[in-house]
Amino acid sequence: MEVSVESFTVLAIASPEPAGQQAAWGDYDNDGDLDLLIARPPGLFRNDGGGSFLQVSLSLPYSQRAAWADFDRDGYLDFLLGDPTGNRIFQNDRSGGFVFVEPLLAGVRAISTIDADNDGDVDILEKGPSQNPFSGSPITRFYRNDGRGVFTLLPGIFPDLQSNGALEWNDYDYDGDWDLLLGGYTEAQPLKLYRNDTRGVFAETLVNLPWDSTEVSWIDYDNDRRVDVVMTGTRLFKNLGNSFSNVTEAAGLCCGNNGVWGDFDGDGWHDVMIAAPALAGVQPGRIFRNLRNGNFAQTEPPLPSVADDGSAWGDYDNDGDLDLVLTGASGLGPAKLVRNNSATSNALPSIPINLSATVLSGGQVLLSWSPSTDSGVWASITYNLRVGRTPGGIDVMSPEADLATGWRRVARVGNAGATNVWKLWLPPGQYYWSVQAIDSSFAGSGFSEEGTFVITAPVIVQQGISAGRVNLRFSGAAGLQYSVQVSPNLVTWSTAGGATEVSPGVFEFEDTSVNQGSRFYRISSP
């Protein structure tokens, strides 16, 4: 099917037309259509249907980055705004408004949200100095979500880097957890791959990629199940297995940023919209269609002028094809909607089947299912998990999707990557889960039939009493925090202290306050 730019219609988002540097689609009010969040200057626009957007009355701080996520796992999207003056979370109050949460860290420009430690909730990675991105003090900070949308800084996870370097997550090795491509945009801070070895413990690996890229994208453009890399300048590097090869010229791409990727023609192959870097000024945006043979063809004529890489694909009118919002650097013109007028509606991927849950030691569970297909293509599919403590629950892992219809409330890949296997580390209990497939147009299948699994409680494997001391040694989930509670009568309980993890999944606790009489112990975890 030949697609030209005449298949798109350029529209105003609202009156007056908003500017903006970055856009993100998300259905914050759970009404079944995508709303629009724009940064620099910030604004939230509610989709009222029929192509009509209404700006929501919110007092939002100046920001350069914006991201949607269900941080507190209540089924409603929250959002994060990032800026050198501070990154701020706005929690959804489930009645159409948002509650401001105190800034996490001042002076950070790059932000990313992902479940980096495989415990089911969304964590935050921030990077970059305050004010000047090239000369300020470098900062890289990882914040762990406690599951309720409360974050704790974990120092030393990644090196401090300048903000203008690369920051992008993907399950590079298809082993069921998120890996990170990270760099500082200097020869002294080259691009490195941080492979997630186990539950947020990362191994640093050099890769044969240039250091001079302010942005980077993981994308399997040729559907060979090896995720490739696109860098600033629209440089495309094909993954050869153990190295990367620059195939930009051969693929027919050129002259822009790392691109905004999405399957606008619904054929199961990733297409790309490319804008000029902000320093190059306002230039026409260009759409390149994936020809499914390793090459791309530019559509003609080009799109309206745009600068920088804040544009985003999303099916805002629910007609089964990806539309586009065009944004650019501040002061370079208003944001625009680009409606896809294709008469061919995207076919949904097949629903995953054959669910299996394998419970391992230390609170780990391995979830797997049979791969789905999308128009005969399976390599471009990602997966989206739902996990809860009750049937149909999402209080462990929110899918950011409608469980009844599969409607995806964010326009992005699934939370379990492109493999049909995912790892989780969870406290003891019974869990219920299901999974859906997400295609390269960010459309979701229905959810699978529900599966269930049980993680057993910690077991005391050794105890000792001597000279008024009680020593406990027990097994549990590696990396979790356990507290020991005591009681004289099994009715009133108090916390005696926290247990120490002496080896992965093995914990010890010493009680030095033992008196005569009965003393009962129990172990709890968050």
Image (cartoon, grey):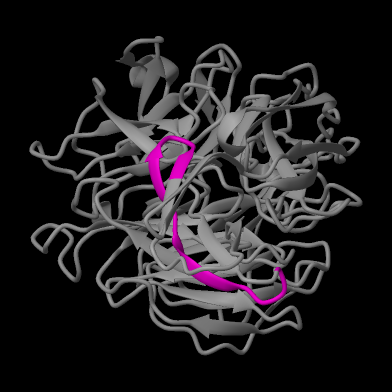
Magenta stretch, overall SS: strand
In the displayed structure, 470 sits above or below 88; it is above
User: Picture coordinates of residue 165 (x, y %)?
Assistant: 24, 46
Q: Which quadrant is the N terminus positioned in?
A: top right
Q: Quadrant of residue 190?
A: top left
User: Residue 265: within the magenta?
Assistant: no
Q: Is residue 247 visible?
A: yes
Q: 452 or 503: nearer the eye? A: 503
User: Picture coordinates of residue 196 (x, y %)?
Assistant: 41, 32
In the displayed structure image, the side of residue 452 where residue 465 appears, left or right: left
User: Picture coordinates of residue 342 (x, y %)?
Assistant: 78, 41
User: Picture coordinates of residue 184 (x, y %)?
Assistant: 19, 45
Q: Quadrant of residue 413?
A: top right
Q: Which quadrant is the C terminus positioned in?
A: bottom right
Q: Residue at x 78, y 23 (%)?
A: 372
What's the magenta region?
490-507
In the displayed structure, 119 sits above or below 515; it is above
In the displayed structure, 337 sits above or below 322; it is below
Q: Residue at x 8, y 60 (%)?
A: 135
